[in-house]
Amino acid sequence: MLKLIKNLPYGQGKKNKIRIASISGQLIKIGLGILSSFIATTTSAIAAEQIAVRYSIGTVFISVEDLAIFAQEGNTSSVLSISEKVLTAEDLEKLRQLLITPMTASPWSIQQFNNTPMGTTILTRFGNFIQTDNGENGFNALKIAINQASQLPGGLTLLGILEKFPGQTLEIDLNFATQVIQDLSQIIYQDQSIINWINQQAQAEINNPARQNPPINLRNPGTTPWKKESFTFQNPRRNVPSPVDIYIPQISTPAPVIVISHGLGSDRTTFKYLAEHLASHGYFVAVPEHLETSADGLANFLQGNAQPPDAEVFISRPLDITAVLNLLEEKAKNSAFPSPLLLDNVGVLGQSYGGYTALAVGGATFNSTRINQECEKFANQQITLNISILLQCQATSIANKGYNLQDKRVKVVIAINPITSVVFGQEGMSKIQIPTLIIGGSDDYIAPAVSEQIYPFSWLTTPYKYLMLLEKGTHFSFLQSGEAVIPVPAQIIGPNPELAFPFLKAISLVFFNSYIRGQTEYLPYLNAGYIQRLETSPFSLTIVNKLTQENIQEALSKVRK
């Protein structure tokens, strides 16, 4: 949810810039690629010749050359056969595939973030288990190895990192290696199998002639004139007022209300295109700035003028939504707007950290047991490749305090790339009883779709629930352009986000019309048949309204076979 920016290679040579929000700030597409976010040096060094794998009863030495032969040809040398005593055949095959699988996103440098607590924590934890030949933490050696491996013709691979690791010997803890193999395997194979299963279920609906809706174009602007104004609101947990932009439809009939919550490192302009679209269709739209987690707040942190966002933002963000609704109620009573506001049936849409915010005001509750269990594992040096957990574990200090952040005026929520798996868990997500649409991206490696959206969707108990997946979608695919702060490679951003904007315009309008305005004629459009017709290459969409944990296990069983 960082405000990361890239000059994108589209738009007839025009240097477009995109403001993007990320959860922990930076990461590479898979696995050890996260480490390349913290590259600071390009120092040359003698590459390691062997790997010392430590386990409970001794150490196994493996030649890096033999490992390369094993990875590329599948031949198990006499040296590698020793590892079969400590790794299963299944683990060895997973390792072989992972060694040569390119990490499709290139590494990049974020100088401002190198010495932050978050960056140091991630790299140091890996360094505790991947050490130099003199037993030191591999922090600096990993930076060198990843930087050099990323320059290889075949791209950044795990084998390349091992081949470029400086020193004569690279020491790896076996338990750590096994965990990383399993985690990477899940990301590459198991997660994709679940996404494929969902797409197959949706395809049956697409091919059903009874579900082929007549054409309707909700991507185009509506006919309602509107104007934009800005106010400030007061969150009782904050000493200073916060700004909010409002988009006011110029109508005399009661106007339904939508609140949009931006992600960490974004601001009120990130979803400007969507606010304008909804206003043109007669919705009153409010877009508050969450001060501690806005673009300005993050910039102050990176410049050393502020502390990083802490547990307090898990409380203050949802309360920002409540404070904005209170402000609108007060102004509506004083006839500040051209029409009455329907403030007892509000919709909230949020992305990433804003997705968490939308679900919290919609009824999701902290799952203190899960937070304590999962975050204790992380505190005890467990490595995780789901970077969103780093942010979610910041809620540990407030999880047991019994906060109820639900706002009863909120009756519909859309959560895009939300973080959910630890902070809410199954118990917390099951508390949501209002219509809910969760949107994930197949290529989101910051808030991974399977762990942060697909499993959480299966935990919902509300009968009015929908899961939409954006194929080739990343964590940044719905975010509008802004000013440059930190360079980000196009591979991380993914395809031109402007091509995905029409999807969100159409699906949000369908969902809000159906469940806020009660226009049931729009409900048939919440199906894969209509969604597929919205496609703009290279993106594609699918949507389902049923998914159980048994379905997920069915998808995984095909991988195990």
Image (cartoon, rainbow, N blue to C red):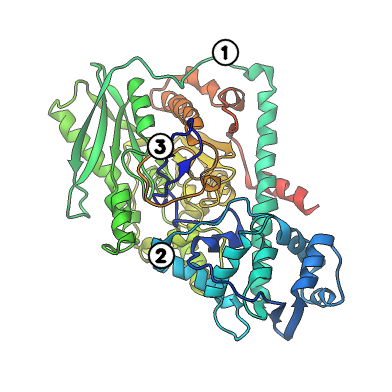
Neighbourhood count class around disc 3 (C-alpha, 10 Å): few under 14, some 14–19, many 20 upward:
many
Comparing labels 2 and 3, the label whose residue is closer to the camera? 3
Q: Residue at x 60, y 64 (%)?
A: 148
x, y percent for residue 104: 62, 50
Q: Which residue is mark 3?
A: 480
Distance of label 2 from label 3 (alpha carbons) = 32 Å
**Disc ID at residue 183:** none
The one of 349 and 266 positioned closer to us in this rendering: 266
Mark 1 or mark 3, earlier in chain: 1
Q: Residue at x 52, y 74 (%)?
A: 140
Is residue 381 visible in the rendered image? The answer is no
Q: Residue at x 35, y 14 (%)?
A: 223
Q: Tag 3, which secondary structure?
A: loop
Distance of label 1 from label 3 (alpha carbons) = 30 Å
Whether pointer 2 and pointer 1 mark residues with C-beta atoms closer than 8 Å, the reply is: no
The one of 155 and 44 positioned closer to us in this rendering: 44
**Disc ID at residue 214:** 1
Comparing labels 2 and 1, the label whose residue is closer to the camera? 1
Mark 2 or mark 1, earlier in chain: 1
Is residue 231 visible in the rendered image? The answer is yes
Q: Is residue 74 left or right of residue 347?
A: right
x, y percent for residue 334: 12, 29
Q: Is residue 31 above or below residue 50?
A: above
Q: Which residue is mark 2?
A: 396
x, y percent for residue 255: 28, 23
Q: Is residue 371 left or right of residue 558?
A: left
Comparing labels 1 and 3, the label whose residue is closer to the camera? 3
Residue type at mark 2 is Thr
Neighbourhood count class around disc 1 (C-alpha, 10 Å): few under 14, some 14–19, many 20 upward:
few
